[in-house]
Image (cartoon, helix red, strand yellow):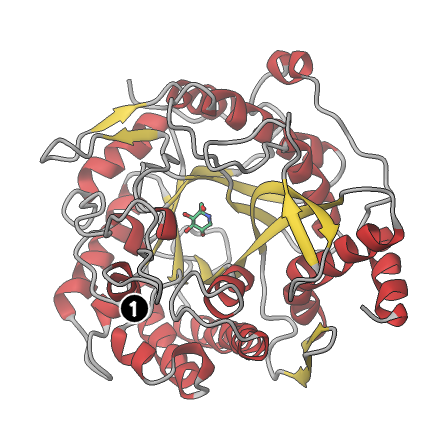
Amino acid sequence: MSPRSLVLGLGLALLAGCGEQRPSFEPEKVNAAPLGKGLPRGFLLGASTASHQVEGGNENDWARWERASFPDGTPHIHDRSVSGPATDSWNRFDEDVKLMKRLGSNAYRFSVEWSRLEPTPGAWDSEAAARYRQWAQALRAQGIEPLVTLYHFTLPTWVAESGGWENPATLDAFERFAGRVADLLGGEVDWWCTINEPNVLAVFGYMDGVWPPGKKDTKAMATVLAHLIEAHARAARQLRTHDLVDADGDGKATLVGLAHHVRVFQPASGSTTDIAVAGLTDEFFNESVPNALRTGRISLSVPGSVSLRREVPGLKGSLDYFGLNYYSRDHVRQDASPSFSHKYVPAGYDTNDLGWELYPEGLYLLLKRYAAFGLPLVVTENGMDDRSGERRPYYLRSHLYAVEQAVAAGADVRGYFHWSLIDNFEWAEGYAPRFGLFRVDRSSPELVRQDTPAVETFREAARNLGLTPTP
Ligand code: NOJ
């Protein structure tokens, strides 16, 4: 790292709040707080899913990836599973709506599967379209606000084969798709999420090579991240011109957002290099996307390989709310890898079953940070892999507490969506992790959904918010 980037990193680390006093949530306080009472009126409380992870039977770039291996023979999916039937939510949506009602939720975030709706270029599957429309209608009829994601990690194979997100033509195809989905669902849907976690997709798919298309190319990573940001701006324009129906009667026909994955990057020591690298990591991973959205100008830099700057028409002002997906904190030590950093969780810290640190204070810190954006915030995802089911109640309680503390500190937070409604296909980790409020028994042919203890915690929050869970 050059001395210049070091100084820059140090400055950014301080700006990013690494120097600010860290809050600490004592369990006694968290447990004693009346869960949900501090959430504002009209707050959206629900769960999130994504098409490929729950629908089952999808044929797209991920389905292909799941069946293949890395050149050394290691399977792409750690537990060697393929998504296959997933949770069969394509055929069991009514069952899933009952689960939402049992939670007392008033909102549900799900994604539409591009490969189902447009299986070949320009084609439109009217049966699939009708089903998504029925879902949106069913949700609304049950008093559940749909929040629809247009793109959640999976591409139709025809898009992937023609270069995926590296190819600028994909932006044209996605823009058309966004307009068609707005025509299809706009009568029922007001809340939209254009793209899920552009930063994660770019890094996993194009830098770490652990997701399709399995590239390790920092320049391609930056190209893709820039294209995803641009795709968001173009989709936002389509949503706003094609969805003119105010489905919930609140005076707003279209609320456009994007779900951005944010993490806390904690310098592993007080050394200048660790602080600088944590700051640079924070700047690239957490800030590149919101900075572009704020200014209308993409500016991506990775010392030594990437310096990409460009103005994107329509990007500035393209958001009505900012979505945050928050899970964890990384401790960052400087090293010689392409990202200059080693990220880890020190021994003795509390983690989920995938080894991710449980750090509810981070959600509070990041909500406060992004409140400065001046837009309403929505926690579009938050959850943990909890295979015993025993620890999710406290996870949920402490993270909702973080939301309530941020609201009390002045952050305009409009919603919280737990990841996930039900256990589902966790990408490269397969089916081993369990993120669901409801457990899915994969050995039963009906993929039976069962309550986990966190259902009761969720119901408590819902009741305190004035909602009415079904018995
Ligand atoms: C974020 C992603 O959007 C979602 O697809 C994934 O399953 C969860 N994180 C948990 O890793």
Q: Residues within 10 Å of mark 1 (few under 14, many from 20)?
A: many
Residue 319, image x and y in percent?
A: 59, 64
Residue located beneath label 1 in the image: 61
Label 1 beta carbon less than 8 Å to ligand 1: no
229 vs 286: above or below:
below
Q: Residue at x 19, y 40 (%)?
A: 94
Residue at the front extreme, as displayed: 72
- Circle 1 — which element? helix
Q: Quadrant of the C terminus?
A: top left
Count of picture labels: 1
Q: Quadrant of residue 112?
A: bottom left
* Residue at the spot 39% in from the left edge and 33% down from the top edge: 105
Which residue is the extreme one toward the bottom?
169
Closest to the observer, 97 or 366: 366
Q: Position of residue 307 (x, y in %)?
A: 71, 81
Is 27 drawn above or below residue 119 in the view shown? above
- Please determine whether, in this image, residue 373 is positioned above or below residue 383: below
Instruction: Please give the name of the residue rendered at 72% of the width and 57% of the height, measured from the top-left corner.
Output: 335
Left or right of residue 450, residue 317 in this image? right
How far across and how far down the image is residue 272, in percent? 89, 52
Name the image quarter holding residue 126. Answer: bottom left
**x%, y% of residue 424?**
31, 42
Q: Is residue 81 left or right of residue 150?
A: left
Q: Taking the image as drawn, is residue 297 in sight?
A: yes
199 displayed left or right of 342: left
> In the rendered image, is residue 411 in sight?
no
**Residue type at tag 1:** Asp
Question: Which image quarter holds the N terminus?
Answer: bottom right
From this viewpoint, which residue is outermost toward the left? 445
